[in-house]
C-alpha cells in the first residue's frame, strides 16, 4: 500500500464515529478492533516466526485479568490472620501492568518453545491456556471464579486528583482501540521489517541454515513470544475496561481458534492479513446473526476455514496480492511470479 | 602430528573425535588439524563419516568431551549459532537457501550477526537503524558481486537455477564473515566450467584470509585447490598429506578402488543433483 | 486408607477408557503425524450414537454400543478420505488448521442436532453398586472396564498379529521403505485413522452411560488424549495404555486430596511437566509401536 492510500485509509477510520451514529455498529467495530490487535500479535508468533502457538487467548486473558485486578485492588487471604492487600491503582497503570504480566508469560512460553517443538509445542500451548482458565475458575479468592470480576473501572488517563480523561462511552473507546491498533501495527511492522524480523522469517523457513550463520534461535523465539504476548495483553486490557466485566470464559479455546482463523484466512506472515481476517470474522457474525444460529455460524466458519486452507492456502491477502501483480504485468524485477506464499520484501515494508 | 609444510598456525584441532549412533560407529577416534589460511579437504567414500564430522564441528551433532577446538576454544556442546559467532560457518550438502526470500535478503540474513540495531532502536525507528539497513544492503550487494550473482539480486532464492543456488549458499555463509569456512560438497552437480570458476573463487576466498575445510568427491577439484588432503574411510583416517602424496598412497587407492576411484569426478557429475 | 483404595478402584475403572482414547490417538499421531483435533468429537459422536440408538430407537443397549463403534470407524475413514488425503504432503500448520475447522464444524453440528441440554443414557445394569468390603463400584463401571480391556487386548492383537498391523508398524518406522515394500500407504492411513476414531467412539459410547452427554464433552476427552499420548510417548501402545491408567489415577487422587475443581487440569499439568523434562514421554522407545 502506498503512502497516499495509507493516509486516506487512516483518515477514513478516524472519521467513522463522526458519521456512523449507530452505537451498535460502533460496538461491533470496537470488538473487531480488539480482536484485530490480538490477531496481529498472534500473527507475529504464528505467521512470522512459524511457531504453532495455540494458547494465545491465555495472554489476552492474563492481560485483561491483571489490568482488572490492579485497577480494582484485591486482597488475598494468605493465612488465617494475614491478608495481602493490594490497593486499587489508576487504570492506565493497571493497563501497563497487564501488558507486563502478559509479556512475562510470553517469556515463559518462549523459553519452553525452544525445548519442545512442532506438534508437541501446539499441545503445550493449548494445555497452558487451559491451566490458566482453570486457575481463573478455581482461585476464587483472587479472581471471583465464575462470579466474574465486575464493576471494572473504565479506561482513564491522567493523574487522579489533578486531571483525568475517562473513556466511558463508545466513541472515546473506539478511538482508544483505533490508536492502540495503529500503535501495535507500527511496532510489528517495524520489528518485522528489521534485521530481527528477517531472522524470525529465516527461522521459520530454514532453521538449520539460520543457526549456521549465527541466528540465535532461543533469543528470537523468546523475543517474538514476549512482544506477541504483550500486545495480546494490551488487547485484553482494552477489552476489560470497555466491557467492564471479565470471567474465566475469556480463556476458552474457541477464542484462540477465532484468532487463528482470522490470521490464517487473512494471510499469515503478512501485515495486512490479520486485519483483513479480523474484519471479516469480526463483522461476519453480525451479518449472519439474523440468518443463522450461533452454532450454524460456527459450522460455516469451520467449513470456510477448510475451504480457504485448500484453495487459498496462504490466505486472502497474498492471493489478492499475486492476482494484483499478475494483472499489472509480471510483478517484481525479473522475478518468477512469487508463489502465494511470498512474504512482502523484507526491509521494504511500508505501513 | 600432521604435515605442515609452511609452518602455519593450527586453528582447528580435532582430537580423537568419536561418534556412534546406537551401535553404529560413524567416526572412530579421528584426529586431524587445519592450519590458518589453508584449504584442507576431507575426502573418502560415501559413508566414511565426512558430513558427520562437519555436523559435529558445527554443533549440529553433540560430541562429548573436548575433541573439537577452534583457536583454543572448545566447540563441543556449543550450539550452531554460538559456533558461528566464533567464526566457524558451514554450508550444507543438500542445497539450503531461504527459498521464499530474495537473493539479496538471503545474504542479508547471513549478515545478521554483524548488524547491531537493538530492539528498542528498531521500535523507535531511530535513524541509525535505517543507516545500518542501507549499509547492510550495500554489503550484500558487494558479496553478490563477488559471487557473480548480482543479476539475480531480486529473484527468489528458490527460483534460481541449481548452480546459482549453490553459489548463493556460499554467499550467505560468507556474509556471516567466517574465519573458518566449511563447505559440504559445494560443487556436486556442477558442470566442468562451473566447477572451474568455483575453484577460482575458492582461491579468492582463501586470499582474503579465510581458512577453508572442504568435503568433496570431485577429485579434480580437490587435487586442484587443496593444500592438504585428509582421507577418511569407514570412520577412520587412513591418510593425510599433500594432494600428490595422497594420489600415490596405496591405502587410498585401495579404499577407492571398489568405488571406481579415477572415475569418481565423472560419476559425480553425471549423478548430478544434491 | 479406605478412601485411597476407593480412589484406586475408581481410577482403574476409568483408566480403561482413557487408555482407549490414548491408544487411538497415539496410533493416529504416531503413524500419520496429524494433530487430530477431531478425536474428541469422535468420542462425543460415539456417546450420542448410543443415546440415539437406545433412547430414540429403543434398541438393545449392547447392540447400540457395537453400532456406535462401527459408525465411529466409518466416520473416521470418511474424515481421512475426504479431508486428509489430499493434504498428504502439506505442512503441519495446514493439516492442523483443517482439523480445527473440522472440529468446529462437527461440534456445532452436534450442538444443532442434539441441543445443549444434557442427556443421559439408560443402561440395563443395576444401579446399586457392588460393595466389596470398604470399597464399592457400580456395575456399569465394571462392565465398561471389562469392555475396555477387551478392546485394548483386541487392538494389541490387531497390531501385532495381523498383516494390517504389521503394515501399520512398518509405516510408523520408515514410511519410504514401507512404500517401497508394497505397503499401500493411503490405505494404511485410512485404516489407522478409522481405527483410532473407532476407539475414541468406543470410549465415548462406554462412558456415555456413566456420565451425562453434552456437545462439548469431547474437548476434555481430546485434551486428555493428548496428555496420555505425551505421557506415554508418541507411538507407544504400552505407553498409551499405562498412560491412560496413570492419568486416571492422578486425576482421582488430585480430585480427592487436593481439589476437585482442578481435576481436569491434572492432565494439562502433566503434559506441561512431562514435555519440559522428558519430551519423549515416559515410555517412548525409539521408533516403535508396541
Image: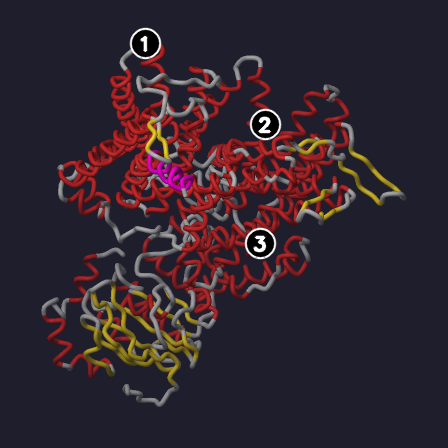
Mark 2 vs mark 3: give the one in front: 2
Q: Which mark is residue A269?
A: none
Mark 1 vs mark 3: give the one in front: 1
User: Element type at marker 2?
Assistant: helix
Question: Which residue does the numbered mark 1 point to in the structure image?
Answer: C57
Does the segment drawn in magenta span residue C3? yes
- Residue C128 location (% of width, % of height): 36, 22
Decide: few, some or many residues near mark 3? Use Cα within 10 Å; few <14, some 14-19, many ≥20: many
- Is tag 2's residue or tag 3's residue first in the polypeptide sequence? 3
Question: Which residue does the numbered mark 3 point to in the structure image?
Answer: A194
Question: Are discs 2 and 3 located on one and the same chain?
Answer: yes
Q: Are marks 2 and 3 in contact (CB under 8 Å)?
A: no
Q: Is residue A182 left or right of residue B165?
A: right
* Dominant secondary structure, magenta: helix
Question: Which residue does the numbered mark 2 point to in the structure image?
Answer: A282
Q: Residue furthest front?
A: C133
User: Element type at marker 1?
Assistant: loop
Magenta segment boundaries in residue numbering: C2-13
Mark 1 vs mark 2: give the one in front: 1
Q: Residue furthest right?
A: A162
Between marks 1 and 3, how big is the CA–CA gap? 64 Å
Residue A321 seen in the figure:
no
Q: Is residue C26 left or right of residue A10?
A: left
Residue positioned 39% across, 54% down in the render: C278
Front one among A183 and B96: A183
Between marks 2 and 3, how big is the CA–CA gap? 30 Å
Residue B191 seen in the figure:
yes
Decide: few, some or many residues near mark 1? Use Cα within 10 Å; few <14, some 14-19, many ≥20: few
Q: Quadrant of the C terminus of chain B?
A: bottom left
Amino acid at each position: 500500500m502506498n503512502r497516499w492510500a495509507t493516509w486516506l485509509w487512516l483518515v477514513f477510520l478516524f472519521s467513522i464515529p463522526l458519521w456512523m451514529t449507530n452505537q451498535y455498529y460502533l460496538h461491533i467495530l470496537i470488538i473487531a478492533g480488539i480482536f484485530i490487535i490480538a490477531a496481529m500479535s498472534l500473527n507475529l508468533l504464528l505467521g512470522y516466526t512459524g511457531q504453532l502457538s495455540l494458547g494465545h487467548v491465555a495472554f489476552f486473558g492474563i492481560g485483561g485479568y491483571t489490568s482488572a485486578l490492579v485497577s480494582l485492588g484485591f486482597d488475598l487471604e494468605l493465612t488465617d490472620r494475614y491478608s495481602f492487600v493490594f490497593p486499587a491503582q489508576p487504570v492506565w497503570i493497571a493497563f501497563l501492568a497487564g501488558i507486563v504480566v502478559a509479556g512475562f508469560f510470553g517469556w515463559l512460553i518462549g523459553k519452553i518453545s525452544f525445548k519442545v517443538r512442532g506438534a508437541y509445542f501446539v499441545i503445550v500451548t493449548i494445555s497452558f491456556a487451559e491451566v490458566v482458565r482453570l486457575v481463573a475458575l478455581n482461585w476464587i479468592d483472587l479472581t471471583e471464579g465464575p462470579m466474574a470480576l465486575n464493576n471494572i473501572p473504565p479506561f482513564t488517563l491522567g493523574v487522579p486528583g489533578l486531571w483525568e480523561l475517562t473513556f466511558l462511552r463508545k466513541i472515546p473507546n473506539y478511538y482508544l482501540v483505533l490508536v492502540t491498533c495503529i500503535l501495535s501495527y507500527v511496532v510489528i511492522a517495524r520489528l518485522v521489517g528489521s534485521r530481527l524480523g528477517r531472522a524470525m522469517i529465516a527461522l521459520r523457513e530454514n532453521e538449520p541454515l539460520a543457526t549456521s550463520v549465527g541466528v540465535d534461535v532461543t533469543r528470537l523465539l523468546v523475543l517474538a513470544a514476549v512482544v506477541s504476548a504483550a500486545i495480546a495483553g494490551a488487547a485484553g486490557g482494552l477489552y476489560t475496561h470497555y466491557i467492564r466485566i471479565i470471567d474465566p470464559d475469556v480463556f476458552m479455546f474457541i477464542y484462540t481458534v477465532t484468532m487463528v482463523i482470522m490470521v490464517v484466512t487473512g494471510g499469515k506472515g503478512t501485515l495486512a492479513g490479520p486485519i483483513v481476517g479480523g474484519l471479516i470474522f469480526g463483522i461476519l457474525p453480525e451479518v449472519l446473526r439474523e440468518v443463522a444460529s450461533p452454532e450454524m455460524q460456527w459450522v460455516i466458519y469451520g467449513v470456510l476455514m477448510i475451504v480457504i486452507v485448500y484453495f487459498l492456502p496462504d490466505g486472502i491477502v497474498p492471493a489478492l496480492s499475486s492476482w494484483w501483480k499478475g494483472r499489472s504485468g509480471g510483478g517484481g524485477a525479473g522475478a518468477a511470479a512469487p508463489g502465494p506464499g511470498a512474504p512482502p520484501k523484507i526491509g521494504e515494508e511500508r505501513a | 602430528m600432521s604435515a605442515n609444510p609452511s609452518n602455519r598456525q593450527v586453528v582447528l584441532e580435532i582430537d580423537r573425535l568419536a561418534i556412534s549412533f546406537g551401535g553404529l560407529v560413524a567416526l572412530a577416534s579421528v584426529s586431524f588439524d587445519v592450519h590458518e589460511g589453508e584449504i584442507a579437504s576431507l575426502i573418502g567414500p560415501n559413508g566414511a563419516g565426512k558430513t558427520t564430522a562437519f555436523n559435529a564441528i558445527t554443533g549440529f551433532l553433540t560430541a562429548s568431551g573436548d575433541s573439537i577446538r577452534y583457536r583454543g576454544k572448545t566447540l563441543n556442546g556449543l550450539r550452531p549459532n554460538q559456533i558461528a559467532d566464533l567464526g566457524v560457518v558451514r554450508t550444507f550438502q543438500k542445497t539450503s537457501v531461504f527459498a521464499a526470500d530474495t537473493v539479496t535478503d538471503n545474504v542479508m540474513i547471513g549478515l545478521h550477526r554483524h548488524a547491531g540495531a537493538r530492539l528498542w532502536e528498531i521500535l523507535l525507528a531511530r535513524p541509525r537503524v535505517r543507516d545500518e539497513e542501507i549499509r547492510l544492503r550495500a554489503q550484500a550487494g558487494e558479496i553478490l558481486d563477488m559471487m557473480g550473482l548480482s543479476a539475480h539480486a531480486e529473484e527468489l532464492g528458490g527460483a534460481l537455477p541449481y548452480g546459482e543456488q549453490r553459489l548463493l549458499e556460499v554467499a550467505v555463509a560468507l556474509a556471516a564473515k567466517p574465519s573458518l569456512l566449511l563447505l559440504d560438497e559445494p560443487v556436486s552437480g556442477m558442470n566442468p566450467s562451473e566447477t572451474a570458476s568455483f575453484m577460482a573463487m575458492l582461491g579468492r576466498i582463501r586470499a582474503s584470509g579465510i581458512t577453508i575445510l572442504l568435503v568433496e568427491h570431485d577429485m579434480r577439484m580437490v587435487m586442484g585447490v587443496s593444500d592438504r588432503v585428509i582421507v577418511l574411510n569407514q570412520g577412520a583416517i587412513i591418510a593425510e598429506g599433500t594432494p600428490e602424496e595422497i594420489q600415490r598412497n596405496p591405502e587410498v587407492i585401495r579404499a577407492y578402488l571398489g568405488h571406481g576411484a579415477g572415475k569418481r569426478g565423472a560419476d559425480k557429475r553425471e549423478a548430478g543433483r544434491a | 486408607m479406605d478412601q485411597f483404595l476407593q480412589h484406586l478402584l475408581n481410577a482403574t475403572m476409568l483408566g480403561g477408557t482413557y487408555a482407549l482414547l490414548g491408544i487411538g490417538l497415539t496410533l493416529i499421531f504416531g503413524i500419520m503425524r496429524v494433530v487430530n483435533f477431531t478425536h474428541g468429537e469422535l468420542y462425543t459422536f460415539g456417546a450420542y450414537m448410543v443415546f440415539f440408538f437406545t433412547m430414540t430407537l429403543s434398541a438393545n443397549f449392547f447392540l447400540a454400543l457395537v453400532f456406535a463403534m462401527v459408525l465411529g470407524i466409518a466416520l473416521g475413514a470418511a474424515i481421512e478420505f475426504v479431508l486428509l488425503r489430499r493434504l498428504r504432503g502439506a505442512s503441519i500448520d495446514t493439516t492442523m488448521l483443517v482439523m480445527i475447522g473440522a472440529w468446529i464444524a462437527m461440534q456445532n453440528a452436534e450442538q444443532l442436532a442434539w441441543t445443549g441440554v444434557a442427556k443421559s443414557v439408560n443402561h440395563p445394569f443395576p444401579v446399586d453398586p457392588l460393595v466389596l468390603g470398604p470399597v464399592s463400584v457400580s456395575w456399569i463401571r465394571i462392565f465398561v472396564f471389562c469392555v475396555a480391556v477387551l478392546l485394548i487386548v483386541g487392538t494389541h492383537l490387531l497390531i501385532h498379529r495381523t498383516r494390517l498391523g504389521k503394515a501399520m508398524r512398518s509405516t510408523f518406522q520408515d514410511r519410504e521403505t514401507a512404500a517401497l515394500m508394497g505397503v499401500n500407504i493411503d490405505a494404511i492411513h485410512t485404516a489407522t485413522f478409522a481405527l483410532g476414531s473407532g476407539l475414541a467412539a468406543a470410549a465415548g459410547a462406554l462412558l456415555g452411560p456413566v456420565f451425562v452427554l453434552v456437545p462439548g464433552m469431547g474437548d476434555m476427552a481430546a485434551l486428555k488424549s493428548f496428555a496420555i499420548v505425551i505421557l506415554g510417548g508418541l507411538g507407544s501402545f504400552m505407553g498409551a495404555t499405562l498412560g491412560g491408567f496413570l492419568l486416571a489415577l492422578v486425576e482421582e487422587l488430585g480430585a480427592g486430596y487436593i481439589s476437585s475443581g482442578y481435576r481436569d487440569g491434572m492432565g494439562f499439568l502433566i503434559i506441561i511437566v512431562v514435555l519440559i523434562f522428558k519430551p519423549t514421554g515416559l515410555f517412548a522407545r525409539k521408533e516403535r509401536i508396541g
